Structures are given as C-alpha cells and as structure tokens.
Image (spheres, rainbow, N blue to C red):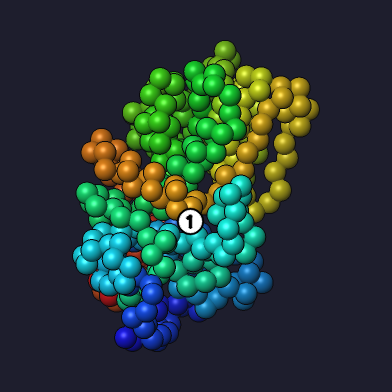
C-alpha cells in the first residue's frame, strides 16, 4: 500500500515522500487528530541551530496524534478503535531505566519521521487504546503523558509531606501538570506561579495562583514543578530554591537551549532533590488514557485546546503552524489529508 509522508525539508517547506506499507506485523493506523508542539514549531520556523536542521531534515513533524485502527495482525485492537500513538521507540530492555531515557531510544519527529502521514504502521506495543475519549482531546494524549511521567517520577523521588506543591509557569505544560497533580493529590494544595494574568485565569481549578513578581513574603512550598523553560528557567528555579522547604523535590521540566545558573549553596543547605523529567513511555500512556476517561478532566483539558479547521492540503499545514503562534495553549486539528 502506497503511503504519503509529508516531510519538512527546510523551514516552512514541505515535500511528499512516497513509501510502501506492507501488511506485516505492525498495526496500521489512520491519523485522525493531531496537536502542534513547541518542538515542531521550532523546526518549522527554523529556530534550531543550522547544524541540527541539516542533521534531522527532511523529517515528518508531529508527535502528538491519535487515530483509528485499520489493521491489527495481533488482534489487540479492533478495526476503527481510537488509539494514541507513542512516539518514543526504545531499542533495549531495562527493569531500571525508563524507556524514554535509555541509550538507543529514538523519538518520532526528532530525527525520525513523525505522524504527518496518510497512514502509520507502528508496532502494537507503541499503541494504547483511547476508547471513551473524544478524538480532539485524544490528540494531546502524548502531551498529557509528559505530565503523568513527571508525577510518576515525583512519587518515587519525593518524601510524603506534600501539603503544598508549587508549579512555576503559566503555559500549556504548567496547565497539564496542574491537571494531573490536582487529580492525583486531591489533599494537597496546588499553587501556580506565572507571569501572564490572562493565562492564570485558566487555572481556576487550582487552590491559588500568584504573579511571579508578587509572591507573598511568607510563601512556602514542600515541592515544586518547573514548567517554564527558556530564559524563564533561571528565575523559576531561583524562586523555587528560595521558597521550598528543606528536603523538597524540584521537578525540572522546562527545556532551555542555554545553560542555567543554579544556586547550589542553598540546594546543598536545604538538601534538595532536583529531578530532570522529559518525554514519556508506554506506562505513562496507559495511565494518561485511564485519566482521560474522566469527564471532569476532559472538560478541563478542553479549556486549553483551540481546534483549528481540518487539514486537507499542504497549505492547511502551513495555516495550522501559523495559527499556533497566536493560540494561548494547544492547537489541535483534524487530519483529513
């Protein structure tokens, strides 16, 4: 079966690659809904170093995707079943190292073709059922798994005093982390610290929100999640170290292209634990899929989603990336190409 793969060959330039799919051992999925990630946007806009672009392009973008099963030789999924697709692809086994950190693991839409394709052939163990989940919300499953993975690692790394958990950031990542933590730790006080008053109004379900420049002097937290990234990482990490209680855990989630200075004197004095958390694996997808069947969580996530018009041409792909630059949180679109 001939497959169309829509590759980015240079910033803002797409080309179609033709591939042949065989009905072999893999599951074949027809993409239904997708979401744009900041990483996709950086490739599309040419905001990565030239050496990285030359190394990774041409490449199909998008790693947030759900679709309908067309063919499953394993009998695990029924025809037409809505599933989430896992972009992380491990090549080794380990009972200790999570699959998204193992040497040899690779990630679709980062050096390997992502999901901008007519059909996707993928191993059955890289697919998770989304039965009972609306497709436009299923599109951001992978994004939700990033927050779920961080919460799973937080469970392992942190002590049990979790009276107040702070989240630094007011973007999409901070929003899904807030959703996950509010659901997982209903007895904890969840506080969000951001810089955009308009965006902070979306966080009405958490216990408190503060503008970063106006944090109360007596503010204190037990643990924190840093979701800023970029130049904001320094200020967020510095704030957390200042306000966190001794032996607290700081989950580092924001991506920064530059090195970030950290106040190690206070890290040592307080005995803090800093944990880097990135991407996710199948267990996180299974946990996220179970969470997504909760109607309350669906409503919360729908608040952060802007659904653009369906994509029916390459021009529409350009339109979606342009639209995403002006949306507050996540841009989702139906794939009809």
Q: Quadrant of residue 206?
A: top left
Who's the residue at 38% across and 86% down the image? 20
Residue 323 visible, this angle: no
Mark 1, secondary structure of its residue: helix
Quadrant containing the N terminus in the rendered view: bottom left
In the displayed orientation, state which residue is furthest to the right. Answer: 265
Pick the front one: 189 or 215: 189
Who's the residue at 44% across and 57% down the image? 37
Q: Is residue 49 above or below residue 200?
A: below
Who's the residue at 45% across and 69% down the image? 114
Pick the front one: 313 or 114: 114
Who's the residue at 54% across and 21% down the image? 160
Question: Which residue lies under the disc numbered 1?
Answer: 38
Residue 51 visible, this angle: yes
Q: How many marks?
A: 1
Where is residue 98? Give x, y as percent.
Answer: 57, 50
Q: Quadrant of residue 105?
A: bottom right
Report whether 68 appears left or right of 215.
left
Where is residue 106? Give x, y as percent.
Answer: 56, 64
Where is residue 111? Give x, y as percent.
Answer: 56, 70
Pick the front one: 68 or 126: 126
Q: Local crowd at mark 1 within 10 Å, few (<14), some, or many (≥20)?
A: few
Q: Quadrant of residue 288?
A: top left
Q: Is residue 7 above or below residue 297?
A: below
Where is residue 201? Give x, y as percent.
Answer: 35, 32
Report whether 329 appears left or right of 245.
left
């Amino acid at each position: 079966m001939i497959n169309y793969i829509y590759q980015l060959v240079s910033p803002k330039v797409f080309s179609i690659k033709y591939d042949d799919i065989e009905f072999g051992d893999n599951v074949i999925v027809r993409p239904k809904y997708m979401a744009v990630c900041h990483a996709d946007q950086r490739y599309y806009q040419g905001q990565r170093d030239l050496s990285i672009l030359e190394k990774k392009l041409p490449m199909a973008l998008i790693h947030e995707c759900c679709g309908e099963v067309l063919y499953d030789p394993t009998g695990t999924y029924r025809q037409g079943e809505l599933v989430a697709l896992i972009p992380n692809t491990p090549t080794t086994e380990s009972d200790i190292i999570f699959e998204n950190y193992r040497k040899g693991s690779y990630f679709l839409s980062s050096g390997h073709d992502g999901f901008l394709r007519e059909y996707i052939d993928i191993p059955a163990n890289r697919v998770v059922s989304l039965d009972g989940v609306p497709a436009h919300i299923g599109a951001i499953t992978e994004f939700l798994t990033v927050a779920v993975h961080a919460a799973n690692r937080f469970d392992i790394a942190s002590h049990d005093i979790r009276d107040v958990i702070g989240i630094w950031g007011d973007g999409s990542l901070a929003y899904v982390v807030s959703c996950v933590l509010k659901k997982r730790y209903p007895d904890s006080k969840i506080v969000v610290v951001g810089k955009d008053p308009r965006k902070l109004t979306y966080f009405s379900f958490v216990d408190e929100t503060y503008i970063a420049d106006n944090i109360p002097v007596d503010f204190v937290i037990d643990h924190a999640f840093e979701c800023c990234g970029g130049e904001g990482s320094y200020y967020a990490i510095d704030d957390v170290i200042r306000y966190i209680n001794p032996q607290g855990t700081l989950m580092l989630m924001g991506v920064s292209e530059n090195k970030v200075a950290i106040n190690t004197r206070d890290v040592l004095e307080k005995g803090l634990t800093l944990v880097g958390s990135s991407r996710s694996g199948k267990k996180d997808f299974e946990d996220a899929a179970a969470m997504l069947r909760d109607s309350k969580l669906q409503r919360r996530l729908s608040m952060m989603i802007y659904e653009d018009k369906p994509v029916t041409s390459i021009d529409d792909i350009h339109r979606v990336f342009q639209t995403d630059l002006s949306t507050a949180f996540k841009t989702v679109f139906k794939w009809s190409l």
